[in-house]
Image (cartoon, helix red, strand yellow):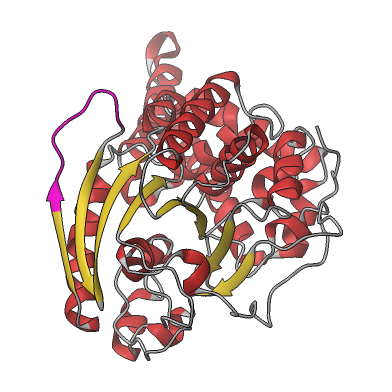
């Protein structure tokens, strides 16, 4: 995998943009620690994670030391927007049902829903899941209320109506309280956050993306060998805009290698909306830039992503000079052992995070996807995937009903 002329990485800065996730960033540190240790034991290399002293001027992060043919020092930092996610999720039952109606209208009236269904049915089943279950919960609550009315029909002063309303509401509130198991409210708030302005970034998120851009730009001014931006799920389109603005502002010729690893992307959920002109412009721009190496990794086994869909092409904004992203598959059914795949293939939400986890059926060679070799190994993203051809199954047919650029 070294290849002739490959640049050895001795020091790397990694920035990680999570998807729509209300949990604190230490969750990703513990995931990296656990899965990195497992991958190291499987693949036969050394990987050690250590804490980094708190620094109010830097994002939450940790240090990694590895030896994979040669030693590499890595600093991983999480670009946090979980506080914005938490704020957007502070809605009760009534507010969530209002969001359901508004989100359904945005996707339906704009034509985005039908275009997305034609693109990939898997993620659209995931998108329709919260709508179907919320409607089902409402029908169950109405049924309970009706039953209460029937049983308590003889209460004085119309008290049966109050009891029926209270029981129906209790059903809805009960479902909300167990949503950690069902993910209904969580998924709806995810889609609603994207649809709130028809696909445009809300002002508070624009400000956060500017902060992210400054952090990555500052890292490019240090003496590391590579700066790698990793983005997952709903964080991928945020990463696109961060890097597009960064490159527009100018990247010095002497800067370290710049890489972008996008994982489990759901870009079309945003880029197909009428207000996503800035995102579409950023996709088109980033896809032509030689300053960055962009590798997009998805897997057909992940029903929450738009697997093997070129996010630039399917959004209808692929320019004549497009060179990125390199679209490849993590091939869960092959890179996980038969026993592990059988265990995980029905755990849809867990599979959506598999890109950040260990694979136990690696075959060796340059085509294996190993998150820890990419983030903590001795090769830049460009060198690791140099000469790699895109997946033969990638989808490039333009599907977006809205293709205007801001």
- List x then y, in percent, for residue 227: 43, 50
Tell me where the magenta segment starts and ends, as one range: 50-58
Q: Which residue shows up at 77% across the image and 47% down it?
A: 112
Q: Is residue 62 visible?
A: yes
Q: Tell me, yes or no, if residue 151 can be seen here.
A: no
Residue 308 image position (x, y, % from top left): 63, 70
Along the line of sight, which residue is nearer the eye, 219 or 278?
219
Taking 264 as reference, is 402 left or right? right
Query: Measured from the top left, where is residue 83 in percent x and y?
Result: 37, 27
In the displayed orientation, state which residue is furthest to the top: 157
Residue drawn where x is 45% and y is 27% of the image = 93
Residue at image point 74% right, 54% down: 288
Task: Indicate whether 181 appears above or below 122.
Answer: above
In the displayed structure, 92 sits above or below 159; it is below
Residue closest to the eye, 242 or 134? 242
Along the viewing direction, whichever of 367 and 224 lies nearer the viewer: 224
Classified by dominant secondary structure, the portion drawn in magenta counts as: loop
- For residue 293, side relative to residue 2 (left or right): right
> Compared to 183, does 69 lie above or below?
below
Q: Quadrant of residue 72?
A: bottom left
């Amino acid at each position: 995998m070294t290849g002739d002329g490959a640049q050895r990485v001795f020091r790397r800065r990694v920035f990680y943009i999570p998807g729509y996730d209300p949990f604190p960033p230490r969750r990703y540190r513990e995931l990296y620690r656990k899965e990195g240790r497992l991958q190291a034991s499987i693949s036969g290399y050394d990987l050690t994670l250590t804490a980094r002293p708190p620094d109010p001027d830097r994002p939450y992060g940790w240090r990694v030391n590895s030896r994979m043919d040669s030693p590499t020092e890595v600093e991983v930092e999480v670009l946090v927007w979980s506080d914005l996610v938490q704020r957007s999720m502070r809605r009760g039952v009534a507010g969530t049902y209002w969001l359901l109606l508004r989100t359904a209208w945005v996707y339906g009236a704009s034509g985005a829903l039908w275009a997305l269904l034609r693109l990939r049915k898997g993620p659209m089943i995931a998108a329709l899941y919260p709508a179907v279950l919320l409607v089902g919960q409402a029908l169950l609550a109405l049924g309970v209320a009706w039953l209460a009315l029937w049983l308590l029909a003889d209460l004085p002063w119309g008290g049966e109506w109050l009891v029926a309303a209270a029981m129906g509401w209790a059903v809805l509130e009960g479902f909300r309280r167990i949503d950690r198991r069902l993910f209904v409210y969580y998924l709806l708030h995810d889609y609603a956050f994207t649809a709130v302005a028809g696909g445009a970034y809300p002002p508070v998120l624009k400000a956060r993306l500017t902060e992210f851009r400054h952090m990555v730009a500052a890292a490019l001014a240090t003496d590391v060998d590579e700066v790698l931006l990793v983005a997952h799920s709903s964080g991928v389109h945020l990463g696109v805009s961060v890097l597009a603005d960064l490159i527009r502002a100018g990247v010095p010729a002497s800067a370290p290698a710049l890489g972008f690893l996008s994982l489990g992307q759901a870009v079309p959920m945003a880029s197909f909306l009428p207000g996503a002109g800035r995102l579409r412009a950023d996709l088109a721009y980033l896809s032509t830039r030689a300053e960055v190496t962009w590798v997009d990794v998805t897997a057909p086994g992940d029903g929450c992503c738009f697997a093997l869909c070129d996010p630039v092409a399917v959004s209808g904004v692929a320019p004549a000079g497009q060179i990125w992203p390199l679209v490849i598959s993590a091939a869960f059914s092959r890179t996980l052992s038969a026993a592990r795949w059988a265990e995980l293939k029905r755990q849809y939400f867990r599979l959506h995070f598999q890109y950040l986890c260990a694979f136990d059926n690696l075959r060796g060679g340059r085509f294996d996807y190993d998150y820890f070799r990419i983030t903590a190994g001795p090769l830049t993203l460009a060198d690791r995937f140099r000469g790699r051809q895109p997946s033969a199954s990638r989808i490039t047919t333009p599907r977006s009903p809205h293709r205007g650029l801001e």
